Image (tube, rainbow, N blue to C red):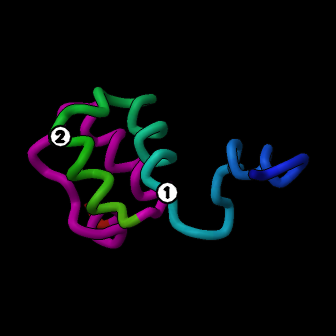
Amino acid sequence: MLHGARAVEERHSPPSIWGPLRGDEALSLVGNFIDATHSVASACIERAGGNPLFLEQLLRNAQEGSRDAIPASIQSLVQA
């Protein structure tokens, strides 16, 4: 059984700030743009590979109706 601060820490872990997004963080971000249950949401999460800025841009494209054209990389997104 955990006690004190450690118990709170394990129940309420902060967002990752130095590494890739965790799955729950990615889903939370997706929910701000499109329906998280949509297949495009899964494709965007997978394509972004945990990169929050890339995920956000992919979601903006999906939100604008570019659902069929999910860029393969950050580089292709910038060049578009």
The three-letter code of the residue at mark 1 reads: Arg
- Crowding around mark 1 (Cα neighbors within 10 Å: few <14, some 14 to 19, many 20+) is some
Find residue 77 and name its label: none
| Up/down of 58 relative to 16, above or below | above
Which residues make up the magenta segment?
A: 50-78
The three-letter code of the residue at mark 2 reads: Ser
* Direction left: furthest residue: 68
| Up/down of 27 relative to 50, above or below | above
Q: Residue at x 52, y 66 (%)?
A: 20
Q: Residue at x 78, y 48 (%)?
A: 7
Q: Earlier in the sequence, mark 1 or mark 2?
A: 1
Q: Is residue 51 magenta?
A: yes
Identify the residue under disc 2: 66
Q: Quadrant of the C terminus?
A: bottom left
Q: Position of residue 41 (x, y in %)?
A: 26, 42
Identify the residue under disc 1: 22
Direction from residue 59 to residue 29 in the image, left or right: right
